[in-house]
Image (tube, rainbow, N blue to C red):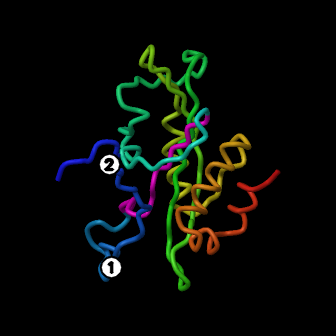
Amino acid sequence: MAEEKGEKKEKKQIQFTIIKNDPTDGHRGFGTGVLNLENVTPVFIDVEERKAFIDMGGMHARSQVERGIKFLPNKEEVPNGKPYWLVWVTVERKEEGPYYHGVTACELTVDRSIRRGYKSLPEHVNRMDKSLKGHIIVSHMDKESKKVLADFLKNHDPGMWERSDEKLKKDLEEE
């Protein structure tokens, strides 16, 4: 099927991952205690462009933002880095339906001209873990990025936003 001139091919919209059946359901053997990442989604916020997007490559540090970049643990070594937030969003289900259970943000910067960036790997891992456990850690984000994230989560699924904890709404919508 050929594209008509002037028509743009629409990108497939990536959705949040919602929990599947528990693979250890009914037994306590192999796999018990293993971290289940099926319900966590990496959302990137481009601070300068003021836009949010899902990139599942972020689960293994292979997102479009991170590809081809050597990350350094010292922010001062990347003085011209473009700022991003990597937000770990965990979705759980309650009787009324799915909701945003855990939302935690991590900072990273990328300077494509020198193929270097800054991120704290321990912080990224710990924040993913906190998101899985239902924590909301977004208060350290800049005001504009909070608004971008709140709008993204609301627009993705208004019902999920409504069913989410008041702390998430308060922390993202504070003036």
The residue at which mark 1 appears reads as 25
Instruction: Give SS at disc 2.
Output: loop
Q: Is residue 52 magenta?
A: no
Q: Tally the numbered discs.
A: 2
Q: Is residue 166 left or right of residue 129?
A: right
Q: Residue furthest bottom?
A: 95
- The amino acid type found where label 2 is placed reads Lys
Residue 144 lies in quadrant: top right
Direction from residue 21 to residue 93 in the image, left or right = right
Q: Which residue is mark 2?
A: 9
Above/below status of 128 relative to 69: below
Foreground tag (1 vs 2): 2
The mark that comes first in sequence, 1 or 2, is 2
Q: Which residues are magenta?
A: 34-47
Residue, x 36% and y 43% (percent of image)?
60
Q: Position of residue 145 (x, y in %)?
A: 66, 43
